[in-house]
């Protein structure tokens, strides 16, 4: 059996654009769906031979709003993937949907095509909060959408929620969580609202609109971690919680540094030792595939030193965390400086250790950007120290540091 691979297909079309969204998604471009489909199908066919030694064990159709793309097009994509790629039996196949664009009939058909996991954008149970960020649905449509998922006999459902929305209070957030729990999803993703530059929400904030502050978001987060644990949801990543056996196989590939291939406009990949991304432009993507024009927006080989940094940045997003001998074995790096710093974090209640494995606590997750930054500085210093020792020992030429900007 070959190396496992995650496959991501990006559908950039939406019914409408939410005020906080900075993903590559387009409203009012439905007339370009057929041409995009033609390009994406060709791209699937051209890319599959590159992965002939890999077994695809997760497929994720994201966006945008894939459910807005239509049952027929989604069926064509899944059929092409199964025909061209080596897809494992029992592969996790996730479809992102919005409640206003999903039906039982659509879901039944897509289940027969292999879709076995639905990720639904609920965001809030409060209609006023949904309207405040121009979500295209109501909470009742969420309830109806979940019923459609269950009637279609799909047994793996994720609901997305956002805390920190305009007008949101501690009480309204707790109500949203409780109402989400009443719908009995197998998985919950709870994200803190981030004001991304260039979005309509950012413009609103610049004009003086106030949002729940960082301390309020922190309180909402810590309450959520505790409440979901009480309800039987295990936190396995900063923002993700699952019933036993329902962790997202595809998303774990990102956090654990496993290979994935992305296809579609703005899709990213980490495959074959190379990280690359396709153009964030619908028309340029279509031309690039169908007419042979420029298609990549970035491409780089990832050196071991950067993989070492990614190990810290990504694994410490999860409760799986990092492990001393795993680190030493994979990257030939001294773990002692990191262990000393992690011990400090442990004393502050920000990290915990089980054997040689470390991970952050919920309080540590809240500070993870800062804490990981400190660990990366220690890693950089250790890398420089290792290089100097090798130069002194004659293993490396003395002008190496100069060549690398040192």
Image (cartoon, rainbow, N blue to C red):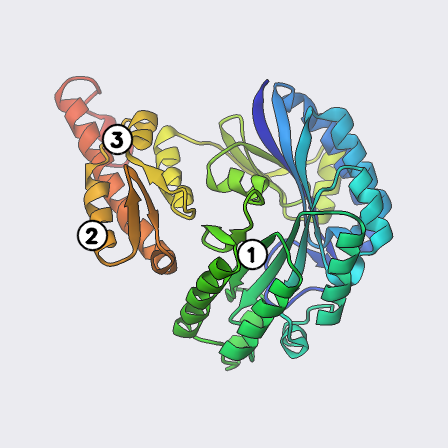
Q: Nearer the viewer, mark 3 or mark 1?
A: 1
Residue 257 locus on image (x, y percent): 47, 36
C-alpha gap between disc 3 and disc 2: 20 Å
Check residue 333 in the rendering and tell me which mark sits there, or answer none: 3
User: At 62% across and 64% down in the image, what residue appears?
Assistant: 180
Specify whether 321 is left or right of 48.
left
C-alpha gap between disc 3 and disc 1: 34 Å
Q: For this rendering, which residue is in front, 29 or 7?
A: 7
Q: Earlier in the sequence, mark 3 or mark 2?
A: 3
Check residue 293 in the rendering and tell me which mark sits there, or answer none: none
Q: Earlier in the sequence, mark 3 or mark 1?
A: 1
Q: Are marks 3 and 1 in contact (CB under 8 Å)?
A: no
Q: Decide: is 261 above or below 194.
A: above
Q: Secondary structure at mark 2?
A: helix
Q: For this rendering, which residue is in front, 291 or 378?
A: 378
- Disc 3 crowd rating (10 Å Cα; few below 14, some 14-19, many 20+) is some
Q: How many marks?
A: 3
Q: Earlier in the sequence, mark 1 or mark 2?
A: 1
Q: Is residue 200 visible?
A: no
- Disc 2 crowd rating (10 Å Cα; few below 14, some 14-19, many 20+) is few
Q: Quadrant of the N terminus?
A: top right
Q: Decide: is 287 above or below 228.
A: above
User: At 37% across and 35% down in the image, what residue appears?
Assistant: 306
Q: Secondary structure at mark 1?
A: strand
C-alpha gap between disc 1 and disc 2: 30 Å
Specify whether 312 is left or right of 400.
right
Specify whether 51 is left or right of 373.
right
Check residue 344 in the rendering and tell me which mark sits there, or answer none: 2
Identify the residue under disc 1: 189
- Disc 1 crowd rating (10 Å Cα; few below 14, some 14-19, many 20+) is many
Residue 342 locus on image (x, y percent): 24, 47
Residue 338 locus on image (x, y percent): 24, 42
């Amino acid at each position: 059996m070959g190396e496992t691979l995650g496959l991501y297909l990006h559908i950039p079309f939406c019914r409408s654009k939410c005020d906080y969204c900075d993903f590559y998604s387009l409203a009012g471009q439905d007339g370009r769906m057929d041409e995009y489909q033609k390009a994406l199908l060709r791209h699937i066919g051209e890319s599959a031979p590159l992965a002939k030694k890999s077994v695809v064990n997760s497929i994720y159709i994201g966006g945008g709003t894939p459910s807005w793309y239509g049952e027929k097009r989604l069926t064509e994509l899944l059929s092409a993937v199964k025909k061209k790629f080596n897809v494992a039996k029992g592969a996790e196949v996730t479809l992102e949907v919005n409640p206003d664009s999903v039906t039982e009939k659509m879901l039944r058909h897509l289940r027969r095509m292999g879709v076995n996991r639905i990720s639904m954008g609920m965001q809030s149970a409060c209609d006023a909060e949904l309207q405040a960020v121009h979500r295209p649905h109501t909470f009742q449509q969420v309830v109806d959408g979940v019923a459609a998922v269950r009637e279609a006999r799909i047994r793996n459902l994720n609901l997305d929620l956002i805390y920190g929305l305009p007008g949101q209070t501690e009480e309204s957030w707790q109500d949203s969580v409780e109402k989400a729990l009443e719908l009995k999803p197998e998985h919950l993703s709870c994200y803190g609202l981030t004001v991304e530059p260039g979005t309509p929400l950012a413009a609103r904030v610049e004009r003086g609109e106030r949002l729940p502050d960082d301390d309020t978001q922190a309180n909402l987060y810590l309450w959520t971690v505790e409440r979901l644990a009480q309800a039987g949801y295990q936190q396995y990543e900063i923002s993700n919680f699952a019933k036993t056996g329902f962790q997202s196989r595809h998303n774990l590939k990102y956090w654990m540094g496993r290979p994935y291939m992305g296809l579609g406009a703005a899709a990213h990949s980490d495959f074959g030792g190379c990280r690359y991304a396709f153009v964030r432009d619908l028309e340029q993507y279509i031309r690039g595939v169908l007419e042979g024009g420029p298609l990549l927006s970035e491409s780089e080989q990832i050196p071991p030193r950067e993989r070492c940094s990614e190990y810290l940045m990504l694994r410490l997003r999860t409760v799986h965390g990092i492990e001393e001998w795993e680190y030493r074995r994979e990257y030939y790096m001294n773990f002692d400086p990191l262990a000393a710093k992690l011990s400090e974090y442990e004393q502050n209640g920000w990290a915990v250790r089980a054997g040689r494995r470390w991970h952050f606590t919920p309080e540590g997750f809240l500070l993870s950007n800062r804490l990981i930054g400190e660990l990366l500085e220690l890693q950089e210093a250790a890398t420089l120290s290792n290089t100097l020792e090798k130069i002194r020992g004659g293993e490396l030429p003395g002008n190496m540091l100069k060549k690398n900007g040192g």
